[in-house]
Image: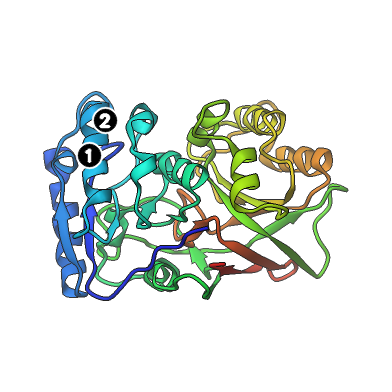
Amino acid sequence: MQYPVLREGATIGVTAPSSGLEANLYHLVERVRERLETEGFQIRIGDTTWTQNKAKSAPAAKRAQEFNAMIQDAGIDLIIPPWGGELLIEMVEQVGFDKLPCKWVLGYSDLSVLLLAITLKTGIATAHGSNLVDLRGETRDELTAMWQAVLSTGAGGSVVQHSSSFYQKEWQHDHPNVFNLTEPTCWRTMMPDGGAALGRLQLQGRLLGGCIDVIRHLIGTPYGDVKAFREAYIPGEPVLWYLENCELNTADVRRSLVQMKLAGWFEHCSGILFGRSPANRPVENYAIEDVYADLAQELGLPVIYDIDCGHVPPQMTLINGAYAEVEVEAEAGRGTVKQHFS
C-alpha cells in the first residue's frame, strides 16, 4: 500500500468528476475557499466545478481530462471534489491509473466509485470522508475536523477517531456551521446468531468500501477486481468492508449485498460496517435490521451498523487500504476506529 501525506500549506485541487454546481450554489465553494485559505491552504478550482447539466458537471472526457491533469500536477497536493452526484462511473475508464502519483483524493457518495477504483487498481490509499462543501462551516464538529489529522498521518503512522456524540437528522444547508447535530449517536451490532454483541466487539482488517448505491456497479469490471487487489497489495490479510446507503430501499440493499457476495467481494472478510442512512425504506415488513441479520448469518461474520459514515453527518475519514482496528462498546453504543498506515 502507498499512503500520501498532507503537508502544511498544501494546495487543494477542486474538480468535479461527478456533479458541479449551478450558479445559485457558487457561494458554497466561495465560502469554503475563504475558510480553507484562512487555514493556510491554497485553492485551485477547475472549470468543471462551475458547470452542471444533464446530471453531470461536463461530458465524461472533459471530467476525466481535468481530473487527470490535476492529479498529475506536481503543484497540487490533494484533490477534494465539491461533492458527489450521479454519473461519475462514466469517466472511470478514462482515468490514467497507470500514471497516478501518490496523492490524496477525498470525498464520498458518488465519488466513492473513483476512490475505490484507484485503490483497487493501484494500491494507493484514498480517503472516504467530507466533500469540499462540507468544510465551509464557521466552526466544525470534532469528527469532521479530523480529516486533516487523518490525511497528515503518513506511512508508518496511525490515527484514532472516536464515534460522534450526536448526528444530524435532517440537512439544513443554510446552517452557519453546516451541520446541526441534535440526535444521540449509537453504534449498533448484529452477530451471526441474530443478536447484538455482548460487551466489547473488536474487528480488524484492511478497509475497503464506499456508497453501496454506486460501488456495486464496479462489480465485474476491471475497476472492481477485489481479488486481484488482495493478492497484489494485502496478501493473506482480511478485508473489513464499510458501506453506506444513499437512496436504496431494503430489498435493493439486500440484492446488492448478495451480488457482492456472489462476486467474491466478501471472501477473506472479517466483518462489515454500515453507516447511518437516510434511506433504508422497508419493503413490506423487511427492515434494514433484517438485512443485516441475514448477511451476518450467511457470512458468519459480525456486522456493526449506524456508524459515522455517509449521508447522515458527521462522518469519520476512512482510508481505503488502511489496516483498521474497530472496537464497539455494545451497551454504550460507542465506537473507536484506529487506522494504521502500514
Q: Is residue 185 left or right of residue 92?
A: right
Q: Is residue 307 left or right of residue 50?
A: right
Outermost residue toward the right in this view: 193
Q: Give coordinates of residue 47: x percent, y percent.
A: 13, 41
Q: Give coordinates of residue 248: x percent, y percent.
A: 54, 32
Looking at the image, which is closer to me, 300 or 100?
100
Give the image quarter of residue 138. bottom left
The quadrant of the rendering that contains the C terminus is bottom right
Give the image quarter of residue 153. bottom left
Amino acid type at circle 2 is Lys
Q: Give coordinates of residue 32: x percent, y percent.
A: 20, 60
Closer to the chain start, of discs 1 and 2, is: 1
Vertical order, 170 against 280 (above or below) = below
Looking at the image, which is closer to me, 280 or 340?
340
Looking at the image, which is closer to me, 47 or 287?
47
Inter-mark Cα distance, 1 to 2: 7 Å
Q: Are the residues tagged 1 and 2 within 8 Å (C-beta)?
A: yes
How crowded is the residue under tag 1: few (<14 C-alpha within 10 Å), some, or many (20+)? many
In the rendered structure, find residue 150 and report the number of the disc placed on it: none
Q: Image point 55% across, 55% down: which residue? A: 321
Q: Image point 31% across, 46% down: which residue? A: 83
**Element marked by disc 2:** loop
Q: Give coordinates of residue 96: x percent, y percent.
A: 33, 38
How crowded is the residue under tag 2: few (<14 C-alpha within 10 Å), some, or many (20+)? many
Amino acid type at circle 1 is Gly
Q: Is residue 267 left or right of residue 53?
A: right
**Element marked by disc 1:** loop
Q: Kindly identify which residue carries mark 2.
A: 56
Outermost residue toward the top in this view: 54
Q: Kindly identify which residue carries mark 1.
A: 20
Q: Image point 60% across, 27% down: which residue? A: 252
